[in-house]
Image (cartoon, rainbow, N blue to C red):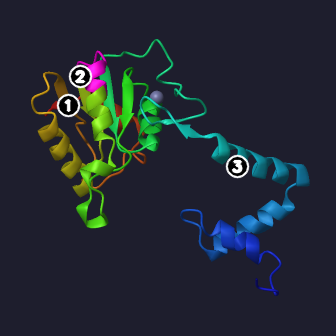
Amino acid sequence: MDEQNPLQALITQLTKLPGVGQKSAQRLAFFFLSLPKPDVTQFAKVLTHTRDNIQYCKHCFNISLSEACFICSDPRRDPHQLCVVAEPKDIFAIERTLAFKGKYHVLGGLLSPIDGIHPELLRIPELVRRLKSEAITELVLAINPTIEGDATILYLTQVLQEWPISKTKLAYGLPVGADMDYADDMTLRKALSGRTPL
Ligand SMILES: [Zn+2]
């Protein structure tokens, strides 16, 4: 540890946050130092508690505090529509639009052979199992328009080719390579309502 800087241990941890460099980390470290002690304790407690208690929903693989997430356990959600996303954060982006009332399925990533992400690493068998056992009539592929996203959509289309249900994908008004997590709610709402058949 750097003996010159008593905040070095904290700064080292803070630089692990996305988008936080040395300078911002130092600013944040001084910010934490300026907080009342109970606030810092509470912050650390919530951080640890969240990490310790978050699990994956056994139905859709969304993040959850219990076996079934808040969407899967909501009887008002339309069981006929299933929206396939790459990551749990995509569910939160779509939920912000209030434009989708069905359920979700999280793949756990996108195909990327270059990074060693092959179909067997994604939750595709689980998706097929759900299609067999649930009353799903429409599959919405809400996947980012990136190289990996397009490859995943193509693969899913092939795997599910024979499946007699409606398959759509988002009508992106977004530039290629965009991340739906950063899309504004209006753009994403339009992408959902104007989804195109596969
Ligand atoms: Zn769920």
Q: Pointers 2 and 1 in contact (CB under 8 A)?
A: yes
Q: Earlier in the sequence, mark 1 or mark 3?
A: 3
| Secondary structure beneath label 2 | strand
Give the residue drawn at x 45%, y 12%.
76
Q: Which residue is mark 3?
A: 47
Dot 1: element: strand
Q: Which mark is residue 138?
A: 2
Marks 1 & 3, CB-CB < 8 Å contact:
no
Frontmost of labels 1 and 3 is 3
Quarter of the view holding residue 97: top left
> Mark 2 and mark 3: span between their CA atoms?
37 Å
Q: In terms of sequence position, does the residue under pointer 2 or pointer 3 come before the other?
A: 3
Label 2, label 1: how far apart the Cα atoms are: 8 Å
Going 44% across and 36% down the picture, which residue do you hit?
61
Would you say residue 190 is visible in this rendering?
no
Q: Which stretch did the figure color magenta?
A: 130-138
The amino acid type of the residue labelled 3 equals: Leu
C-alpha span from label 1 to label 3: 38 Å
Q: Between disc 2 and disc 1, whose residue precedes? A: 2
Q: Is residue 101 above or below residue 40?
A: above
Q: Is residue 64 magenta?
A: no
Question: Is the CB–ligand 1 distance for label 1 below 8 Å?
Answer: no
Q: Residue at x 56, y 39 (%)?
A: 55
Image height of 20 relative to 126, above or below: below
Q: As drawn, is 109 to the left or to the right of 159?
A: right
Task: Provide residue 59's location: percent of width, then percent of height.
Answer: 43, 28
The tag on residue 168 is 1
